Amino acid sequence: MYEVVGRVRSRGFRVLWALEEMGVAYKHVDVGPQSDEARAYHPAGKIPVMKDGDAVLTDSVAIMSYLSDKHGQLGAQAGTVDRARLDAMLHQLNETLDAPLWMIARHTFILPEDQRCPEAVAVEKELVQRSMNRLGDGLTGPFLMGDHFTIADILCVHCLNWAFGMGIAVEHEKLKTYAKDMRARPAFTKAGQS
């Protein structure tokens, strides 16, 4: 059984949601970053971490990709054009949503006040808004990759929720409807209750 270490209100939610979508059993260890408990799994105290037997895996997207490959769900077969497109979408979401959201978090509550830069927050919020609008313009099916729910949808919706929590509203109507539909999935609700 997999062991997922990290808070639901963190990137750990992505892993929990993926496991719920796949119907795979797991144990959830609810610990925060930089805690002694987290350091028992990862020397830097980072979360999420997932244990598969003796293997300790880190990074939410890497863990989701591993699970997708191992269980043949929520992804695309390696060596295919569909897989290249999925990988490209994951990189795009990390670069254009996750990275600027992390920068906003650092400059609003993570860094000491004297090291925060309000100007950086304003710039990053604008970048997130533009990225969300581009994502909405590119939606051609019910899911990011067209007709199939994938780990890219999990990453995207987690980032959209994170943006909303930081006061960045989803303005694009197609993207707003998409996010609402994804949050209505039973696995999303179950992951939030882990």
Image (spheres, rainbow, N blue to C red):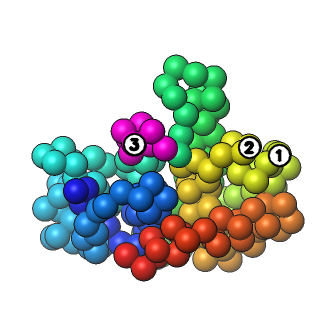
> Dot 2, how many residues are within 10 Å of its Cα: few (below 14), some (14-19), or many (20+)?
few
> Looking at the magenta stretch, what is its main secondary structure?
helix
Screen quadrant of the C terminus: bottom left
Question: Which of the 4 image quarters holds residue 39?
Answer: bottom left
**Residue furthest to the front:** 23
Residue 18, x across and y down, in percent: 46, 56
Three-letter amino acid code of the residue under disc 2: Gly
Question: Which of the 4 image quarters holds residue 46?
Answer: bottom left
- For residue 124, side relative to residue 114 (left or right): right
Q: Is residue 133 above or below residue 113?
A: above
Magenta stretch holds residue 99: no
Mark 3 element type: helix
Seen at 58% across and 47% down, the residue is 150
Give the CA distance from mark 1 to mark 3: 27 Å
Magenta segment boundaries in residue numbering: 65-73
Residue occupied by mark 2: 146
Seen at 62% across and 62% down, the residue is 157
Residue occupied by mark 3: 71
Residue occupied by mark 1: 140
